[in-house]
């Protein structure tokens, strides 16, 4: 189930084809000013999963079917999704969390 959405698209009006990554919402607890989620039981946690070339509607439906609360990250449908995501994820722990991730 989606508890948070982070939209990292450079082309935010493109909804027919996006790439999506989900992570346990509790990963956001380390972000500055984040709401704090309880930790889910380890057997239920979605540490990481991804889908490519979905519509935004399909991405929301998929993320909402998960067994634990997730943050859904939306990216432009290109081959750079993984690199952009992990570069941005590293910034969750710095003082520069809102810095450009491209």
Image: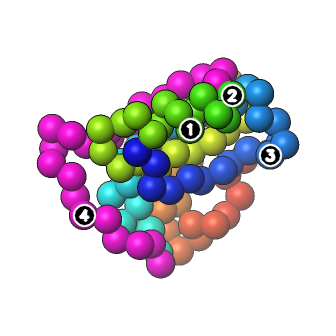
The numbered mark at residue 60 is 1
User: 42 or 62, which is in the foreground?
Assistant: 62
Label whose residue precedes the other's in the sequence (4 or 2):
4
User: 95 or 12, which is in the foreground?
Assistant: 12
Q: Is residue 86 magenta?
A: no
Label 4 CA crowd tier, 10 Å (few <14, some 14–19, many 20+): few
Contact between labelled residues 3 and 1, with CB atoms less than 8 Å apart: no
Asked which secondary structure carries label 3, the reply is loop
Q: Which residues are magenta?
A: 33-54
Asked which secondary structure carries label 1, the reply is helix
x, y (%) of residue 60? Answer: 56, 38
- What residue does disc 4 label? 38
Q: CA distance from mark 3 to mark 4?
A: 31 Å
x, y (%) of residue 4? Answer: 50, 56
Label whose residue precedes the other's in the sequence (3 or 2):
3
Contact between labelled residues 1 and 2, with CB atoms less than 8 Å apart: no
- What residue does disc 2 label? 55
- In the figure, 96 relative to 39: above or below? below
Q: How is the image coloured?
A: rainbow
């Amino acid at each position: 189930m989606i508890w948070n959405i982070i939209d990292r698209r450079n082309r935010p009006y493109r909804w027919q084809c996006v790439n999506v990554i989900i992570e346990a919402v509790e990963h956001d607890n380390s972000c500055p000013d984040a709401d704090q989620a309880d930790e889910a039981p380890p057997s239920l946690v979605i540490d990481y999963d991804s889908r490519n070339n979905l519509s935004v509607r399909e991405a929301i439906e998929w993320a909402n079917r998960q067994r634990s609360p997730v943050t859904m990250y939306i990216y432009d449908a290109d081959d750079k999704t993984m690199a952009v995501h992990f570069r941005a994820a590293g910034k969750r722990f710095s003082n520069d969390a809102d810095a450009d991730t491209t």
